[in-house]
Structures are given as structure tokens and as C-alpha cells.
Amino acid sequence: MTAVASRPSLTVDLPEGARHTVSVGPLTTETGGFLPDVTLTYETWGTLDADGSNAVLVLHALTGDSHVAAHAADPTPGWWDALVGPGRAVDTDRWFVVAPAMVGGCHGSTGPSSPDPDGVPWGSRFPFLTLRDAVEAERRLADHLGIDVWQAVIGGSMGGARALEWAVSHPERVAGVGVLASTAQSSADQIAWGQAQAAAIRLDPAHREGDYYGGPGPETGLGIARRIAHTTYRTAEELEYRFGREPQGAEDPFGAAVGRRQGRYAVESYLDHQAAKLSARFDANSYLVLTEALMSHDVARGRGSLSEALGRFRGRAFVAAVDSDRLYRPEESALLAELLPGEVPVHSIVSPIGHDGFLTEYGQVADALKETLAL
Amino acid sequence: MTAVASRPSLTVDLPEGARHTVSVGPLTTETGGFLPDVTLTYETWGTLDADGSNAVLVLHALTGDSHVAAHAADPTPGWWDALVGPGRAVDTDRWFVVAPAMVGGCHGSTGPSSPDPDGVPWGSRFPFLTLRDAVEAERRLADHLGIDVWQAVIGGSMGGARALEWAVSHPERVAGVGVLASTAQSSADQIAWGQAQAAAIRLDPAHREGDYYGGPGPETGLGIARRIAHTTYRTAEELEYRFGREPQGAEDPFGAAVGRRQGRYAVESYLDHQAAKLSARFDANSYLVLTEALMSHDVARGRGSLSEALGRFRGRAFVAAVDSDRLYRPEESALLAELLPGEVPVHSIVSPIGHDGFLTEYGQVADALKETLAL
């Protein structure tokens, strides 16, 4: 790891695609919390020009990570594989793409499960974070890499919120912003869903106020949070089409005559599966930290009206919404586009599945994104 | 209490409005469970004709009760006050209105908190119920009261589901059915929300697998369930309009710099309030029993196609949907209306608040309901 003290040289030698880590130093959070040493894990694709002018930042969603696309060092599929790569909309033959794991998470960057200076996981002592804290850590990463201006900062869902926060916090360093299925401020509805999810994790006795490392974690609570979240990520229509009222295999959802049902509906089994998958790969404290960071999302905080805040950004803006999204509603994307300076259309991603369409159907807007952001 | 053995006389002397209780005898549930003695609590308004021909059954929603409207014996407001009463759409000067509390609940009728024959609350031993079990108990109540045919069976949400199950189970005893903001079958989406709610209650250590009576109950888990449910009962637009991102009073949702947030957003406080209100008035086991009964709702179960099942009913049908309902979507009401015999329009309740509009804005369809059901 390299400590970031002053501006480093522009020549950072990075093997393409490998996961890198860099210390970006101590971080005092927006609300006064303190982390003595923040490490960011990130992946890169392509080669940075000598003048650092061909860089694109891609930011992940709530439970995402730095693995945006497959590469030689890690050929497993990425979450935006068809968008980022040689010849793709974000052409890695031309652009140097950087994707950090967000601070607070559990995919390499400093988070609640990381050791404090004494080697003890932060747990309950990990500070409350905002998306601006994440942007500050990533600004230092940009400095470290010698990137003055991002040609584009792009993300979907929480990644889009972070991209927009980047654009408004550092308009001079963001030439273009791409916001998919996201908003300028988390809505009351999004806060409501976040609260129920956080409460479910904290209700799990295994959460132990956040200090569960070394023992079993609050997997049941995290699983309930995921069930809630996943249902908001899909549409009622898709769930009906895929599962309807079918039982799961040979199970009988009408179950035992006395006491608890023993069998499940297919949709219950599906959500159980989503819950188990997430619990196996994600730390519950990170889920809490990132969920509450997302609840805090408001590019206008301390910056006047929403219109004034968005008016700070003068670069290219690309906005897209999934037409069936019930969590990040197209109306919210329309408001964002309306308040951004200039004429910003909302590109529609047509999908029956809802919010998750930004992960599965973004191909529909790839060309428009490329053109709008001059990629 | 009166045990229902055979058909009683038609002359049941009921003081208007008081809460009555009647034993409807042993109940073997649809899935083979057994309750040795089911008591139903119900309220009435108006006077039953000598031939028992002027009766209307009104059925409550998930957390509702028998108090549909105020009356002399209990002048507290009811949940459909403006629909039921002298001169109202369901005119109690003309109609004898009966509203039972559903078996499984906690408002007087036999439920998990009721004593078994040994005086011990049923708790974990209470059987899984379906809406058909509730209808069977209510059929016996009709027999007890000497009501052969209901002029109308009316309800909203789960009450609408029960009304429809009545109409399909006993078409010869239902002259008209009124279904507001409800469906013929619980959808995958509704099952998904129900599953998360049930899991949150069961995760609460105070739930103790259902045997918590005499000690503290799973109020936190029930509160989370209510937060989820209440959010589905309202619209994102309404929450945004009422609360937006405002903090609750002088609280700071950005809270402490380290560890758990201390302050709340206004929408969090609102949902905390909804959760506390429900926990104070509702038994968590009853919430589980009724939620899983509603998940089981399917008038077509064992009756062929949905069209065939609905085709059993030949009476008058009134269907209404709240235009902004995201839990019981208007499309589902449209399907129900389409599959009911005859030409059944869907009456639209225009409301910005979503599902709960069936409780607040039903006045919009009161005249149409009265006319359609010949009340």
C-alpha cells in the first residue's frame, strides 16, 4: 500500500484488472467520525494516458463490488460486463476504467469488519458514513492515480447516487456524469424501506450491537433485509409471472395443520435463496453502514436548493431510468434531469423486472451513454 | 354464549351495537387442524327482519375488528363510519348489519392468545388457518342469527378477500358481494411482503416460537412487520409529500459520529409511531395467523380455474380499486371483475395515498356500491 501524502506522480504502474489496494490516509467523516487509515480496493481496465486524461470512474451499487467486468486477472463475470471492455460502450482499449469498492463495505476497502489499529474489527465503533465520505476517499484515489478530471463518472442505483455526488462535490474534476436508476436525494419511500431493513438486522440477537465478529453473524436479520430490498428491486408483475402462487417443488405451503407452516410458495423459496446468497457474501454491518449512507443521500445538503446544488455541475449528464422501477421511480429521474443544467433527456430502459433492470438491460442505453458522455 | 348445535330460531334478540359473542362449536380447519370450541365476537347495527332477509355482512381487513361504525353502545368512531349507519349507503334503518371479528385475530374471537380447554393460551399450538376456515365459522354465525341469504357481503383488503371467498363458497347464501381493494388470489408480491413480515416477528427473541404469553411479546418484530406493511399501504408520492427528507423535529438523522444513528427522519418517526400503535393493540401471533391466512387466499383452490371458481357466484358483484394502490393493484381488480360472471365494472377510488384509500376514500364509491348491491 502507498500512503497518499501529497500529489503522487502520474506514472502509476498497474497490471490491468488485478485488484489493487491503496491507503488514502486518515478520514474525518462528514459528521465528525474518524478512521485513522482508510484503504481502498479497486480494479482497473485499460491504460492511463501519460497526461491522465482518459479516465472513467465506475461506481457500484449497494451490495456491488469493484468487479465491474471480467479481465485476465479475474475472468469471472462482472456486474456490467457488456458495458465495460474492449469495443464496449466504455471501450477499455481507449479508456482507463477505475472501479473502487466503497469505504464502509466488505469487498476490500475499509469497513466495519476491518481491523482497527489494534487489530480488532471496528464493529459497533465504525462511524456513520455519508456518500460524501465515500467521494472524499475516492478523490484521494484519483489524486493517487494522477487523474485530475474524469471523462465520466458512472453508476447505477447507489452507484448513480455516488456519481452524482462526485459531480456536484467536484464539478471541476468530472467532465461527464452517468446516473442510471438513481436520484439526487433519497426519497421518503427509500428511507422507509431502509429503516425496516436496518431494524431487521439489529433485531437479530446475533448482531450483538455490531460486535459479532469471531462468532455467528446476524444472517437471519440480513436475510430479511435482503428479502425486503430484493422485492423492491423487482416488479409485482415479474414475480407474478415467474412464481404466481405456485408451491416450491413438492413442498406444501399449507404446511402442518398445527403451528408453523412447513412448506413454501415458490416466491418464498426464491427470496430465501436471495437472502442466503447475500448472507454468504456480505457483512451485515457493511449492509447497515451502506444502507444508512444511502438514506443520507442528498446532493443539496448544505448547498441551497436542489436546483442550485445540481447547477454546480456544468459537464455532460446522462440520465436513465428503468420504466418499471418501483424503488427509484422514473419520475425521480425526470426531476433530476429537469434540474440539471442544460437539456438533459431521460433515457428509458424498458424492462419488466424493475430496478434491477439497470444491471440486466443497460445495454439498451449503452450507445446513448457513450455518445452523451463522449466516450 | 350459545352453542350452535342445530339451526336456531330466527328470533335472536340483539341489543343494537353491543358486542356479542357466540360459540360456533368445534372447528376442523381446511388443513386438518382442530379447535375444540370457536367463539366469534361480532357487532350489529339495525334490526333483523322476521324472515331474516335484510342482512348485510361486513368483513374487516388484516388488523381491523368488528367496530365498523359507531353506535350507542360504543360511540367511538368505526373504520367505515361513513358507509354504515342511518341514512348511509348501508342504511342501518333498513339493513341489519353484522360484523364479526375474524377467528385467529385478537379482538374477541378465538385466536392464538385465547385459552385452550385447560386455560393455557394456544400460542404455538394454534392451527394454521385459511380464509375458508374463517368463512366456515361465519357461516355458523349466519345460521345462529337465522340469516339464510346475505343481501351483501362487503369488505376491503383482506375483508374483500373474505367476502369473495364467502361468495364462491356459499353462492346460494350471498345475493351480492362488494370487494374493495382486494383480489381473488394473493399474488406473488403479496406473498413476498407477507413472508418478510412473518420472518421479522419470528426473529424477535421475545416471540419464543409463539409461546410468549405472560411475558413480553415480540413487539419489535411486530413493529418491523407493521413498518413493511404500512409502507406498502401508502404511496411513495404521499410519503414524499408528507415527509420528504425532513428530520423529525429537532432530531438529527445524521446522528452520532460513531456507531448507531441517534436521530430520525420524519418518515422514520411516522413509521415508528405506526409500529408502536399496532404493537399496543394487536397480538403478534394473531398477526402471523392472519398474514399467513391471507397469503393462502385463493378462491380457485380445488375449484378448477379462477374463471370456473368465480363462475360459481351468480349474484351482484361490486368491485372497486384504489387507483394508486401498489399492494392490491388495480390490474388485479380488473382481472377479478373480468372473470366474474356478467358485466362487472371496476369502480375507481381516486386517492394519492394508495391501498389505505379503501379506508379513507370509500365515500367516492358508496353510492355505486349501494346501487350495485341493491342496498
Image (cartoon, coloured by chain):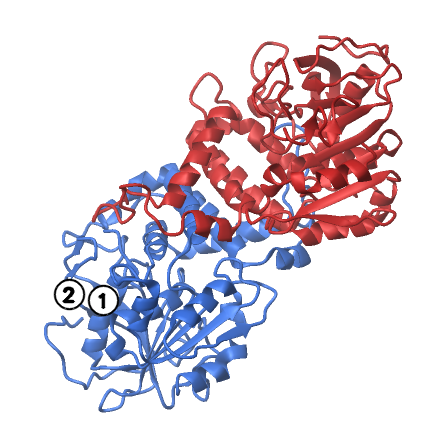
Chain colours: A red, B blue
Report the chain holding disc 1: B
Q: Does B152 sit left or right of B25 as displayed?
A: right
Report the chain holding disc 2: B
Q: Which residue is mark 1?
A: B137
Work out which quarter of the rendered image holds the C terminus of chain A and state it.
top right
The reply to whether residue B184 is visible in this rendering is yes
Vertical placement of residue B303 versus B57, above or below: above
**Extreme residue in the left direction:** B6
Q: Residue at x 52, y 26 (%)?
A: A282
Q: Residue at x 27, y 62 (%)?
A: B304
- In percent of width and height, residue B52 lies at 24, 87
Q: Amino acid at mark 1?
A: Ala
> Mark 2: which secondary structure?
loop
Q: Amino acid at mark 2?
A: Gly
Q: Kindly indicate the quadrant of the structure image that contains residue B155.
A: bottom left
**Extreme residue in the front direction:** A87
- In percent of width and height, residue A300 lies at 79, 43
Q: Earlier in the sequence, mark 1 or mark 2?
A: 2
Q: How many numbered marks does the figure carry?
A: 2
Q: Which residue is mark 2?
A: B25
Q: Residue at x 34, y 69 (%)?
A: B164
Q: Are marks 1 and 2 on the same chain?
A: yes
Vertical placement of residue B266 versus A201, above or below: below
Vertical placement of residue B262 versus B137, above or below: above
- In percent of width and height, residue B285 lies at 33, 50
Which mark, residue A21? none
The reply to whether residue B218 is visible in this rendering is no
Nearest to the observer: residue B94 or residue A97 = A97
Nearest to the observer: residue B276 or residue B295 = B295
> Mark 1: which secondary structure?
helix
